[in-house]
Image (spheres, rainbow, N blue to C red):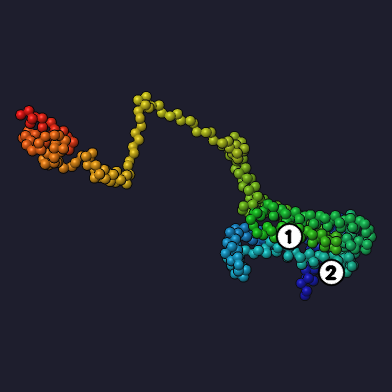
């Protein structure tokens, strides 16, 4: 059996099941009965797709968490596209991430969408499809939405009883379908995706591509298909709003809002227990007071006026240079530097001879003792020798 034919049987059976119950309330040929039957078909299909939606959310979170690894691989193998793809696929397998998981709900709805399109096209052509009987086809052809039949299209409005009404209803539904598709994707990009996520660029492109595709293709869709797609977009918006609010991805605006709500709930519990005066006081506490100024300790006047020691420790290099200068000075000018060895008597006599006039020989014993006694400094020894000469003349 052709898979599309099998899906036509499933879709038509769900549609008839809802119509059987709703027809007893609104009438078999009522537009409300057939419209609500299409809404019921959407609910059943979207419930069956919830596991795929959960997988989509997990895949998006994993992509957000492995972004550092992806950036590292792209930087490491920037010049080798093949190796880069191999490493990325390896990371995807290890983390259980599927980059195409975000498109799975839309891709899997495409066959169902086509099966419903074929079923409604059979109603327009008065050809039963799936489990529809000629009687049910006649009832569906008699039903309308604000005067427009379910099988009518924007381009094929001339084939309907009220072409102008069909065009207006179809145009409104096309606009609603396009807008809900746009806002559903925008809600996910703005609130639940980090700015550094590379998927954001792809999603921004699809943000405008998908609505444009549906707007251009919607002019050929039957009104029943437009109702189906508008309803499934509303379901997607509500489901996505719930997930973003209660299970947002990290590092996103939705995650910050979620943490804020958690803090508000905790603050409300503290206020209820009497631990805080208000929620604002917990969320936005006042800044801490500045520390008290400490006055310096008062000292006695004697300690304040006393000069502070300023020890200066000379470096060894300076000490060595100072010692070398003193040695050089001793060698060049021995008269101005203390001698480490006492001068001999002969040296004393020669000094006396140069300093005074008289015979060079014949100094008294007293003079010798005076010279020996003052032999430590050459300058002093010379003065003492001069003092001994006059005593010898008197004698």
Residue 103 visible: yes
The vertical placement of 259 against 368, above or below, is below
Image quadrant for the N terminus? bottom right
Question: Label 2 neighbourhood size at 10 Å, few (<14), some (14-19), many (20+)?
Answer: many
Q: Assign a secondary structure to mark 1.
A: helix
Real-space CA distance between mark 1 and mark 2, rounded to the nearest whole angstrom: 34 Å
When asked about the image quadrant of residue 2, the answer is bottom right
Tell me: 19 left or right of 48. right
User: What residue occupies the far front of the structure in this picture?
Assistant: 358
Q: How many marks?
A: 2
Q: Position of residue 385 (x, y in %)?
A: 13, 34
Q: Assign a secondary structure to mark 2.
A: loop
Image quadrant for the C terminus? top left
Question: Label 1 neighbourhood size at 10 Å, few (<14), some (14-19), many (20+)?
Answer: some
Mark before the other along the chain sequence, 1 or 2? 2
Q: Name the foreground residue: 262 vs 305.
A: 305
Residue 96 visible: no
Q: Position of residue 355 (x, y in %)?
A: 16, 35
User: What residue occupies the far bottom of the structure in this picture?
Assistant: 1
| Residue shown at the point (10%, 30%) measured from the top left | 390
Q: Position of residue 214 (x, y in %)?
A: 80, 60
Residue at mark 2: 129
| Residue shown at the point (33%, 37%) measured from the top left | 311
Tell me: 140 left or right of 386. right
| Residue shown at the point (61%, 36%) measured from the top left | 278
Q: Name the foreground residue: 25 vs 64.
A: 64
The vertical placement of 182 against 85, above or below, is above
Q: Name the foreground residue: 387 vs 147.
A: 387
Q: Residue 206: which numbered mark, if any?
A: 1
Tell me: 264 left or right of 167. left
When asked about the image quadrant of residue 315, the answer is top left
Q: Position of residue 301 (x, y in %)?
A: 37, 24
């Amino acid at each position: 059996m052709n898979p599309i034919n099998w899906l036509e049987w499933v879709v038509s059976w769900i549609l008839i099941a809802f119509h059987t119950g709703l027809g007893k309330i609104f009438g078999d040929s009522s537009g409300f009965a057939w419209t609500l039957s299409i809404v019921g078909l959407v609910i059943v299909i979207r419930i069956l797709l919830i596991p795929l939606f959960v997988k989509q959310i997990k895949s998006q979170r994993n992509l957000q968490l492995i972004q550092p690894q992806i950036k590292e691989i792209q930087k490491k193998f920037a010049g080798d596209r093949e190796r880069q793809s191999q490493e990325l696929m390896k990371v995807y397998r290890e983390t259980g991430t599927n980059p195409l998981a975000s498109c799975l709900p839309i891709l899997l709805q495409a066959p169902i969408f086509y099966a419903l399109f074929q079923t409604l096209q059979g109603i327009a052509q008065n050809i039963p499809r799936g489990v529809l009987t000629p009687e049910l086809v006649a009832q569906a052809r008699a039903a309308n939405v604000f005067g427009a039949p379910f099988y009518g299209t924007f381009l094929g409005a001339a084939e309907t009883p009220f072409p102008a009404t069909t065009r207006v209803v179809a145009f409104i539904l096309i606009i609603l379908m396009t807008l809900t598709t746009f806002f559903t994707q925008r809600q996910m990009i703005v609130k639940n995706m980090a700015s550094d996520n590379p998927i954001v660029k792809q999603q921004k492109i699809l943000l405008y591509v998908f609505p444009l595709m549906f707007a251009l293709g919607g002019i050929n869709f039957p009104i029943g298909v437009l109702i189906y797609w508008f309803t499934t977009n509303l379901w997607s918006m509500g489901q996505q709003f719930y997930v973003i609010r209660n299970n947002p991805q990290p590092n996103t605006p939705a995650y910050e809002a979620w943490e804020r709500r958690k803090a508000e709930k905790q603050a409300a519990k503290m206020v209820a227990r009497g631990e805080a005066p208000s929620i604002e006081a917990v969320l936005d506490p006042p800044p801490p007071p500045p520390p008290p100024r400490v006055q310096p300790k008062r000292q006695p006047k004697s300690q304040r006026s006393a000069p502070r020691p300023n020890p200066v420790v000379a470096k060894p290099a300076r000490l060595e240079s100072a010692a070398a200068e003193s040695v050089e000075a001793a060698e060049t000018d021995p008269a101005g530097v203390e001698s480490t060895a006492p001068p001999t008597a002969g040296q004393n006599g020669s000094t006396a001879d140069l300093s005074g006039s008289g015979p060079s020989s014949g100094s008294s014993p007293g003079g010798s003792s005076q010279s020996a006694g003052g032999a430590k400094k050459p300058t002093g020894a010379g003065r003492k020798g001069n003092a001994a000469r006059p005593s010898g003349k008197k004698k």
